[in-house]
Image (cartoon, grey):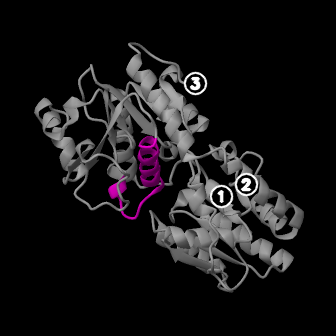
């Protein structure tokens, strides 16, 4: 009989779906296409409806518990609770979002860590969020036998912030939905030429500095472009919007709010360039999405972003408005560079498929199941 591997797909119930939601969704979907030496069992710990449809799987391998995660965690650390939830029957638990029950020693535990930006930068998250986030990460690290990280940068963060041994840490990059984002959008989403940025409106995404750089570049080169920013409101969103509106005297910067993936694809494809000078990222999925859609990319030269972008983007210091402005001017005025980045971006995204993510994950899970001790991270 094949060993059972429990995979937490609760992020599929998050509305609107996040990058972690799509990671869990595509990972499960691609695993179902593979010949596996183990049997995936999918767990949903949420009272919310699915925001993303469940990948095809036998009904017997789907365990849905309509309880909030907070309620679930009150009893999934006890033997009777684990039996009730079906957790006692898995040989390995794969946590897609840092939440791990206190399973027995015979059951192996793997946690996916997507980023540690909340602990790397000061003043970019609320104190309540930091307390909750730090507590969840610490519990996960204490319980995990192995940790999967999505970039070398995050592995470095894990080692430096928590002294977690590298030999128990595996780097498996996320993927991008290349078929979806490369599909040609039929209609231009905005009548004027524009630059585009995407991300939750919060301090970490550095939108105020981006706005200052864009307005300075537009004035210096007399650019006709607008700047469109898509994303839901996060911490300090109103302060950020107010600060930007105070300097945007010509109303050239538009906040679009949360947009659908279809709208997002069109916004990427018709943009003069995608601008993403984030202060810190554990991976940087929007960079790959933009490249898959054919947009030239400007992003930061720190954290995991150079690792993801490679030589297919303009890299700038996100802490210097002048550097961001210079990068925008290059993309707006150098047509050869613009075209080269569009082509390089397409090539770059081919290295980050979800099928590859699933294959590497399946291989790693198989190694963990087979070992009685520690396995190497890479």
Residue 228 in percent (x, y) is at: 62, 75
Rendered image: mark on residue 292: 1
Mark 3 sits on what residue?
378
Magenta-colored span: 12-33
Residue matched to label 2: 345
**Quadrant of the image for the C terminus?**
top right
Question: Is 84 displayed left or right of 322 in the figure?
Answer: left
Q: Quadrant of residue 337?
A: bottom right
Magenta span: chief secondary structure: helix
Q: Nearer the viewer, mark 3 or mark 1?
A: 1
Magenta-drawn stretch contains 30: yes
Secondary structure beneath dot 2 equals: helix
Look at the image and tell me in which quarter the N terminus lies. Answer: top left
Mark 1 and mark 2 in contact? Answer it, CB < 8 Å.
yes
At label 1, counting other C-alpha atoms closer than 10 Å, the crowd grade (few under 14, some 14-19, many 20 or more) is many
Q: CA distance from mark 3 to mark 2?
A: 26 Å
Q: Residues within 10 Å of mark 3 (few under 14, many from 20)?
A: few
Q: Which secondary structure, mark 1?
A: helix
């Amino acid at each position: 009989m094949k060993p059972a591997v429990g995979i937490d797909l609760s992020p599929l119930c998050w509305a609107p779906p996040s990058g972690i939601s799509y990671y869990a969704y595509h990972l499960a979907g691609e695993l179902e296409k593979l010949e596996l030496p183990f049997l995936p069992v999918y767990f949903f710990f949420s009272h919310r409806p699915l925001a993303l449809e469940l990948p095809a799987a036998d009904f017997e391998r789907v365990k849905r518990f309509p309880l909030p995660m907070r309620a679930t965690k009150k009893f999934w650390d006890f033997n009777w609770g684990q039996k009730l939830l079906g957790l006692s029957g898995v040989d390995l638990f794969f946590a897609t979002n840092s939440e791990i029950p206190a399973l027995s020693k015979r059951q192996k535990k793997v946690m996916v860590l997507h980023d540690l930006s909340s602990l790397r930068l000061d003043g970019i998250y609320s104190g309540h969020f930091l307390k909750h986030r730090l507590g969840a990460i610490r519990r996960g690290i204490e319980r995990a036998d192995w940790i999967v990280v999505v970039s070398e940068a995050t592995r470095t963060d894990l080692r430096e912030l928590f002294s977690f041994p590298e030999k128990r840490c595996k780097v498996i990059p996320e993927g991008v939905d290349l078929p979806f984002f490369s599909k040609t959008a039929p209609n231009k989403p905005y009548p004027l030429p524009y630059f585009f940025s995407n991300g939750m409106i919060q301090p970490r995404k550095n939108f105020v500095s981006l706005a200052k750089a864009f307005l300075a570049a537009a004035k210096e080169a007399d650019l006709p472009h607008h700047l469109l920013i898509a994303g839901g409101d996060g911490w300090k969103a109103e302060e950020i919007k107010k600060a930007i509106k105070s300097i945007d005297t010509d109303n050239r910067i538009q906040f679009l709010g949360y947009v659908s993936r279809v709208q997002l694809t069109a916004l990427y494809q018709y943009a003069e360039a995608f601008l993403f000078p984030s202060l810190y990222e554990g991976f940087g999925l929007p960079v790959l999405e933009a490249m898959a859609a054919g947009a030239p990319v400007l992003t930061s030269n720190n954290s995991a972003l150079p690792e993801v972008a490679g030589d297919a983007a303009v890299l700038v210091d996100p802490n210097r408005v002048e550097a961001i402005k210079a990068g925008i001017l290059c993309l707006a005025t150098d047509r050869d560079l613009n075209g080269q980045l569009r082509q390089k971006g397409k090539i770059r995204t081919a290295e980050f498929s979800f099928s590859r993510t699933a294959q590497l994950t399946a291989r790693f899970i198989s190694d963990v199941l087979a070992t009685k001790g520690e396995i190497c991270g890479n």
